[in-house]
Image: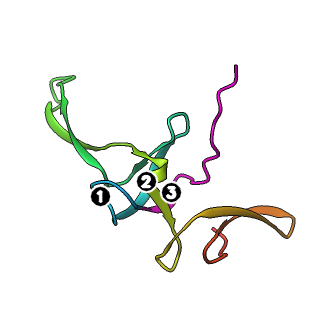
Amino acid sequence: MKEYSKKIKLKKNDTVKIIAGKDRGKTGKILKIDRKNDRVIVQGLNIVKKAAKKKSQQDKGGIIEIEAPLHISNVALVTKDGSTSRIGFEFRDGKKVRIAKKTGEVL
């Protein structure tokens, strides 16, 4: 049986603003998108501490800080003028392009 999957319109390297959670209001670039679980990892945001074991003699163990995944619904795309917008698609000159719904600019 085929599993239902929502269309994720965000892409890697898009600048997004966090709209919910502990880092609300901060912006960053998308490093990774997990389409199966509808999650994104944003550079430098949603930092959590994690205990790491030593893997070799040179490797340092201890507590490290990494970016944790955020749900896709908690981020919004940031346009060039700094406002947030949803993403749509249009055909321009025979090509399908992503546009910002609020401003109409091509992304």
Mark 2 residue element:
helix
Mark 1 residue element:
loop
Magenta part of the protein: which range?
1-17
Left of 37 or right of it: where is 64?
Answer: left
Q: Which label's residue is closer to the chain start, 2 or 1?
A: 1
Q: Position of residue 105 (x, y in %)?
A: 65, 75
To which residue does mark 2 refer? Answer: 74
Asked if 63 appears above or below 78 in the picture, the reply is above
Q: Indicate which label's residue lies in the foreground, 2 or 3.
A: 2
To which residue does mark 1 refer? Answer: 23
Residue at 51% across, 41% down: 38
Is 12 in the magenta? yes
To which residue does mark 3 refer? Answer: 13
Identity of the residue furthest to the bottom in this view: 81
Amino acid under label 1? Asp
| Distance Cα–Cα, label 2 vs label 3 | 17 Å
| Distance Cα–Cα, label 3 vs label 1 | 19 Å
Identity of the residue furthest to the left in this view: 62
